[in-house]
Structures are given as C-alpha cells and as structure tokens.
C-alpha cells in the first residue's frame, strides 16, 4: 500500500470523513511544507501519550485526577453521569451544573456487545458507596446522581440500569428532563419530543 493510500485510509476512519475527503486532505498535506505535517504528526503522538482517563471520574485529562475533580469550589455532593467525556463540555457550556461528573465510557448496547462490565458503572457505585461507608459523616459525601445519558433507547436503558445499581444506597437519582431545545420551535419539533416535554412539565 502506498503512503498516500495509507494516510487516506487512516483519515477516512475519522467521523464525517469519507474516502474522497480523506484523499483531498492527503493531497493538501503533500502540498504543505514538511514542517507542518511533522507538527500534525507530533500533536497526534502527544495526544495519545499524554491524555488518559481521570482516575476518579474517567474524564479525559493529562493528570492523574482531572481539573474538575480537583476543583474544591465544585459541589462534591452531586455527580452528573454522562456517556462520553465529550458530553461534559456541552453540560459545562450550559453553566447550570456545578457538581462532579462520571463518564460511563459508552452506553449499554446488547446488539454491539456492550454490557455493564464494559462501562464504568461499578466504579460509580464505588464512588457512591465509598462516600456512604467510611465517610458517612464526612462533608462531601455524594447525595445526588443526575443521569445525563443521551435521550435514546440505549441511553434510557443505561440510565435505568445505573439507577437499579444505585437503589438503596442513600442517594437521590434523577434523570435529566428532556424537552425542546432552547431556541427550538414547537412547530418543527417531532411528536415524541413534544410529548416528553409535556409529560416532564413542572409547575411554575
Ligand atoms: Zn475527574
């Protein structure tokens, strides 16, 4: 396989990049000064070497413990559970949640062979139990778990499973309300979304 085919094949594995775009990017890189390609290659290498999951919440970090877990100003009593580390950015940008996170590393998907043991559910239960065990009187024990898995069949099933694992552990478990996206238009929303928005309505 030629070097050009090689790179194009690797690039085409990226989300949203088809074979044609991969080839276009490859030829673009060939026209750039060699230095630029070297910097790109180095950045990719460094990424793989330095970035790893946080030992506590499985967020991506270059340290043992991520900056969110280390931040003493964050609410240590609430943990928001997400599927991927990239979901944290979206929730952080919303600016509403000031607690900690837990990254599951995916969602339950029997068809793809993803079971509970493939996710970090046991580690989450440990985090909750640990706070209730030796540190029951300790300030900062986890009191609330917010399940923010995606609003899909698998996301719902995952939330349900996690909830079952956390039952009787002294924590309040809630699921994010799903509704219309802010700035969305009722007229263009699908029926399921509207129905869920109505069911999840709150008294004002
Ligand atoms: Zn962390």
Image (cartoon, helix red, strand yellow):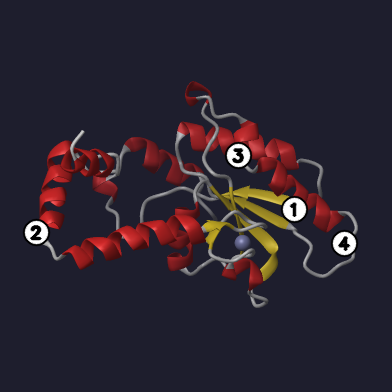
Residue annotated with mark 3? 119
Q: Which of labels 3 and 2 is toward the front?
A: 2
Crowd band around label 3 with a 10 angstrom C-alpha radius: few (<14), some (14–19), many (20+): some
Dot 4: element: loop
> Mark 1 to mark 3: distance in Å?
14 Å
- The disc placed on residue 31 is 2
- Label 2 within 8 A of ligand 1 by Cβ: no
Residue 100 x %, y %: 63, 63
Residue annotated with mark 1? 127
Q: Are marks 1 and 3 in contact (CB under 8 Å)?
A: no
Q: Are marks 4 and 1 in contact (CB under 8 Å)?
A: no
> Mark 3 to mark 2: distance in Å?
43 Å
Q: Are marks 2 and 1 in contact (CB under 8 Å)?
A: no
> Horizontally, is 197 left or right of 139 in the view?
left
Does residue 182 appear in the picture of this structure? Answer: no
Residue 201 x %, y %: 50, 50
- The disc placed on residue 135 is 4
- Quadrant in which residue 141 is drawn: bottom right
Residue 151 against residue 203 in the figure, above or below: above
């Amino acid at each position: 396989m030629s070097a050009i085919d090689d790179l194009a094949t690797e690039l085409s594995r990226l989300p949203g990049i088809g074979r044609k775009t991969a080839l276009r990017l490859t030829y673009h890189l060939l026209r750039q000064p060699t230095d630029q390609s070297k910097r790109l290659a180095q950045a990719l290498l460094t990424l793989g070497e330095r970035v790893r999951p946080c030992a506590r919440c499985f967020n991506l970090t270059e340290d043992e413990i991520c900056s969110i877990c280390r931040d003493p100003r964050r609410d240590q009593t609430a943990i928001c559970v997400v599927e991927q580390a990239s979901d944290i950015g979206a929730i952080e940008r919303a600016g509403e949640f000031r607690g900690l996170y837990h990254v599951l590393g995916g969602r339950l998907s029997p068809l793809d062979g993803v079971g509970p043991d493939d996710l970090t559910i046991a580690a989450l239960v440990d985090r909750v139990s640990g706070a209730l065990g030796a540190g029951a009187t300790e300030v900062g024990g986890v009191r609330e778990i917010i399940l923010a898995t995606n609003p899909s069949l698998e996301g719902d099933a995952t939330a349900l499973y996690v909830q079952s694992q956390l039952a009787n552990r002294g924590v309040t478990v809630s699921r994010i309300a799903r509704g219309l996206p802010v700035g969305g238009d009722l007229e263009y929303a699908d029926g399921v979304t509207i129905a869920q928005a109505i069911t999840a309505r709150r008294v004002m």
